[in-house]
Image (spheres, rainbow, N blue to C red):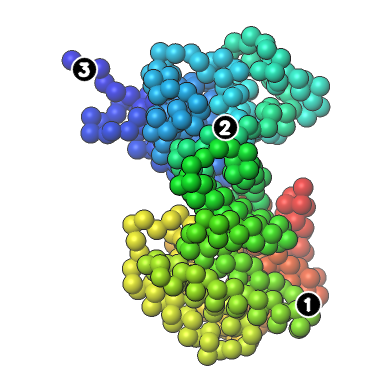
Amino acid sequence: MPETQRCAACQRPLSRYNPDPLCSACLRAARYGPDGAEIPADGGGLTPVWLWDSPPMRRALARLDLAAMMVIFRAATGLSQLELAQLLGWSQSTVSLIEKGQRDTLFDIRELLRFARTVVMPREALLPAILGRPDAALRDVSLASAELADTWMVEDAGLDVDRRTFGGLVAGAAAAVILPSAAVPAQVTAAHARYLQACVDSLYTRDQAVGGAALLRQALMHWQYARRMLGESSYTEPIERQLLAITSELAICTGWLAFDGGNVPLARYLYAEAHLAAGHAGNPVVAAHALEKWSMLCSYLARTAGAANERRSFAREGLRLALQAADQARHEPVPRLHALIAMRHANASSLLGDEAAFRSAITRARRELDRGTRADDPEWIQFVDETEITGHEAMGVLNLGKPGRGETLYRTVLGSNLTRRNRTYYGALLSGALLKQHAREHAIAEGMSVLPALADGVTSVRTLNELRPLRAVDGPHTEERAAFCEQFDAVARSMAS
């Protein structure tokens, strides 16, 4: 009787009809992080660093099950054994033997560190292995023990370290010195491009739960890694185009996370870099994506600028960029992209006081969406739906001085099925719409409903900034206002740190 196949992560028996090495629950959790396993979006206090904070990966690391770790990594990224072998510079047979538990290569800590550097594994991701606990987080590590920094340079020191010694040496050491900088590969292959694309897709998915600030550092690492590949590695001409396109996508993704995390200058720089790389790649979809995000940023600057001439200047720049994006994408059969560009056009037009152009653009966005979605739509455009258009319509009518209509539309949006980050953001925007109608008590109540999420894992400085006008309002110092101000200030201090 053939031996029952078991999930590499949880060891439950697999259905004979399941072609994957993971059960469906572990596969979802690996791809989507804690949210896929119905764990609180902040991971129970864990540092959200893409797939490394997924429950299956953390459990595998905590028990030092490196064979399971590789299977989970492949499942999360969609890489085959051959592609992972190409990524690591190994043979496919080596990867296969490790995953079957027939070779202990990764139990040599030098190989583990080499693997971690190759895939740009965040340093804190090794904490479950260090402390032997799936829920290990940076708060468990004593930064006072930074004198153990040299412990981490195991490979450079040429030390022989087994699993037991590894745990004993590093327990309590500073996480910030776990890994040296990642080394770029001598030859870039399609496997590297596919891995980087998986990183982009997963960062966008995690952003919907935890916001940009929590993910920005990891995204910057991947973008810098891709840029170094362009400058230092060898590759064929087709791979060069792929690498340029994915470097552009990484810059766009990182720019978005920077924007949501409150770093507007960095976001603007990254969008410009993304547009340049997309142009070199000759990829009109990615180029249009960079332009529409840049347009969105300019409209935000127009909405928040102090001087009238600055507001108009930024709004015009946003409109020009939206028109350029539409021109770039004019021959591309991607309805969601055209709908998104139309929303950027609508936003900029409303800021310029052009209600007719605003209405026309919103209608065009809905018409494009009615053309349907495509099975191969990229991850970054999955959020474009009727709810998103309604949210943009709400923002536009507010820009046009109609807060009552904006309130109604925002309430419609909040009645939809939203991600945790988006529900928090639209709640803050509703609070602003109420404040513009001088309904201060109702605005404070809405603001109070938003702050708990910002205090508990949604690291969106952009959302917090939407509540700043409410924090700055003068008026009677009621008990509700005092509570709002106290909680707002606590969240602001937490995000600043």
Depth check, front residue: 23 or 333: 333
Q: Is residue 423 above or below residue 43?
A: below
Up/down of 47 relative to 164, above or below: below
Determine crowd level at label 3: few under 14, some 14-19, many 20+ residues with C-alpha closer than 10 A.
few
Single out the mark in the foreground, 2 or 3: 2
User: Which residue does the numbered mark 1 point to in the structure image?
Assistant: 306
Query: Which amino acid type is shown beneath numbered disc 3?
Result: Pro
Residue 293 falls left or right of residue 486: left
- State the quadrant of the N terminus: top left
Which label lies toward us, 1 or 2? 2
Residue at (21, 17) in percent of width and height:
2
Give neighbour class at mark 1: few <14, some 14-19, many 20+ (Cα, 10 Å): few
Marks 1 and 2, how far apart at CA? 50 Å
Residue 331 % position (x, y): 40, 70
Residue in the image at 49% along x and 69% along y: 328
Dot 2, crowdedness within 10 Å: few (<14), some or many (≥20)? few
Indicate whether 444 appears above or below 12.
Answer: below
Q: Which residue is labeled 2 in the image?
A: 186
Q: Quadrant of residue 313?
A: bottom right
Q: Which residue was labeled with disc 3?
A: 2
- Judge whether 79 appears above or below 286 on screen: above
Q: Secondary structure at mark 3?
A: loop
User: Considering only order in the chain, which callout, 2 or 1, is on the residue closer to the N terminus?
Assistant: 2
**x and y, in percent, of residue 169 in the image:** 69, 15
Q: Amino acid at mark 2?
A: Ala
Task: Give the left or right position of residue 317, taking residue 26 as reference.
Answer: right
